[in-house]
Amino acid sequence: MNQKDDILEKSKKELPQEVLSFIASTKKEAHPESQLIAVLQKTQQHFGYLTSAQLDAIAQVMQIPTAKVTGVATFYHLFRLKSIGKFVISVCTGTACHVRGADNVSKKLKDELGIDFGETTNDGLFTLDATRCLGMCALAPVIKIGEDVYSQVTPEQIPAILKKYFEKK
């Protein structure tokens, strides 16, 4: 086995079989590299986020420059390059939520969790994200934790809301 084959085999071990099968199916198409975003999505769905080892593996298996794979993964906000918490808290920062106090809710969440937007608590329980709009302007300010939506949230409600999730851990 030559060095190139060796690298390819190591790369394949970084990716789940479902991703490898998808990549193999794309090679039958005229432009398999056009499926890069779909490959990244499938990999992130499996692992929850994308590591540099996985990005390198995708590049090797798809025969695309690593810089291109990394560039796509870092350009689109839907891709995560670090692990996320068990519960992702999305704070709506759209106009209606902003006007109705989302900044104060955000500050309280940051203080309670000890993290900023885009960060995960040390225990891996929470990730805090800002989102432009959750489409519930009449219920502003709104936060979403997993699939649970909380409307007309005040900073004073934050400790009780978080307590429910601390108990679920």
Image: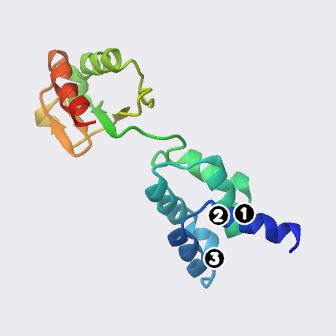
Amino acid type at circle 2 is: Lys
How many numbered callouts?
3
Q: Secondary structure at mark 1?
A: helix
Which label sits on residue 10?
1
The front one of 65 and 1 is 1
Q: Are marks 1 and 2 in contact (CB under 8 Å)?
A: yes
**Residue 1: image location, x then y, percent:** 86, 74
Which residue does the image show at 61% across and 85% down from the upper left? 28
Residue 129: % across, % down: 37, 33
- Disc 3 marks which amino acid? His
Query: Residue furthest toward the right?
Result: 2
Give, as a three-letter code, the residue at label 1: Lys
Density class for disc 1 (Cα within 10 Å; few <14, some 14-19, many ≥20) is: few
Looking at the image, residue 16 lies above or below residue 76: below
| Cα distance in 3D space between marks 1 and 3 | 25 Å
Depth-wise, is mark 3 or mark 2 nearer the camera? 2
Q: Quadrant of residue 112?
A: top left
- Characterize the local packing of mark 3: few (<14), some (14-19) or many (20 or more) Cα atoms within 10 angstroms: few
Question: Could you tell me which secondary element the residue under label 3 belongs to?
Answer: loop
- Closer to the camera in the image, 42 or 131: 42
Q: Which mark is residue 13?
A: 2
Q: Tell me whether the residue at label 3 lies in contact with that at label 2, contact meaning CB atoms closer than 8 angstroms.
A: no
